Amino acid sequence: MASAAQAENTSRSVRATLWILLIVYIFNFIDRQIVNILAEPIAIDLNLSDTQIGLMTGLAFALFYTALGLPIARYADRPTTNRPRLIAVALATWSAMTALCGMANNFVQLLLARIGVGVGEAGCTPPAHSLISDIVPPERRSSALAFYALGIPIGTLLGMMIGGFLADWVGWRTAFLIVGLPGVLLALLVHFALREPRRHLTEAAQTLAASDAGMSIWAAVRTVMGSRAFVLLLAASSTAAFLAYGKVTWTTIFFQRTHELSPGEVGFWFGVVNGAAGIFGTWFGGYLADRFGSKSRRHVLTAPAIGMAVAVPFAFLAYQSTNWFVALLLLIVPTVCNSLYYGPTYSAAQGLVPLRTRAIAAAMVLFFQNLIGLGLGPLFFGMLSDLLQPAYGEESVRYVLYGAAVLGLVPAFFFWRCSLRLDEELDRKG
């Protein structure tokens, strides 16, 4: 009876931790992605070029996010680090900097505020992934990490809807203030509600953690990169992120420029469709990975490989459509398919590395996803749009998105190649 009660309490504690971390990640993506729906009114107000939009929405955030991600992750891997406290401090930081975005009077000030958001958000996901992997058994890890990853589509949906509504109602400056400040209060909840599970580790686990804690950050990186499957996983997830971040930024602008919708209309319609499809795809990807990955490890990444390829023709047709509502409906399939990889990718990353380098593994995935994806995706698409404008005018964004749709075959190939090595490498290192 006592054992059953203890197990039930542990299960409730795990569920509560997952829900709180999900809410934190939702705030993470609201604050990260709201700038996409606000980009066009910001550009008009501050007279920004498409290249500057790409720099502001992507690279300014990503450079500092990625640069700080690895040292923060290594700090999170130390057995003496309180990961919930680290997440709380990070949340308070990025929320305050989001609010400051609304006070920017020029491009440089806005750029600095976005850098501050990146600095704060660097302290969220690596310790969160490490925390989840410590409290959830390997056979349920894909689903647990996919549940946490629901913060991406939910946060993006809310960021689009709230940002678009506020942009039409009170303007982009007040929108940043309204969205940013509640996160500071949430940080207090995180600080007092979450508990660090390391204090309950067995003596053997504590000894292992202490021995690995002396490893330098570069030694930890070398250990993680020693897995060939992990290297292929980095290539797959970073190219997928490059296309995803680039498309979400410029698809919102595409609907405003080409289909002449207001920020509020795009925020609602694209937010709802993209968000709902992303939520389902993220959950379904985790479910498929746990369901079929238990039979053969390679199937952890089968759905992402197939999904990325299936998405290509539907995305191309969506950007070709002259009717905005038809385009939205066509985007449902590629959004679902392109969202299948979140849970399986981070689950595989955690299973391909030793126990005490889990935060580093998550940070490495985030490093490449955000530097290549968030940092270069919106910027590269913006530069291409500027280059194509003399020939295509307002339609330049449409042609950039054509290319992005076809390039979806690249991450599909890397996910497939990585899956072939999972039987050999996954969950062999504890």
Image (tube, helix red, strand yellow):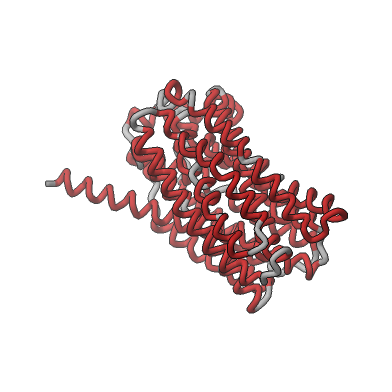
Q: How many marks?
A: 0
Percent across and percent down for residue 429 are 42, 24
Q: Residue furthest left?
A: 1
Who is closer to the viewer here, 209 or 230? 230
Work out whether residue 67 can be spotted.
no
Residue drawn at 73 percent across, 69 percent down: 41
Percent across and percent down for residue 322 are 67, 61
Who is closer to the viewer here, 372 or 174? 372
Percent across and percent down for residue 396 are 78, 55
- From the viewer's perspective, is 37 left or right of 307? right
- From the viewer's perspective, is 343 left or right of 3? right
- Seen in the picture, residue 93 relative to 415 is either above or below; the reply is below
Who is closer to the viewer here, 99 or 279? 279
- From the viewer's perspective, is 379 left or right of 367? right
Percent across and percent down for residue 120 are 60, 53
Work out whether residue 131 can be spotted.
yes
- Seen in the picture, residue 44 relative to 139 is either above or below; the reply is below
Residue drawn at 46 percent across, 32 percent down: 356
Q: Residue furthest bottom?
A: 169
Position of the C terminus by quadrant = top left
Residue drawn at 58 percent across, 61 percent down: 326
- Seen in the picture, residue 324 relative to 62 is either above or below; the reply is below
Q: Quadrant of residue 191?
A: bottom left
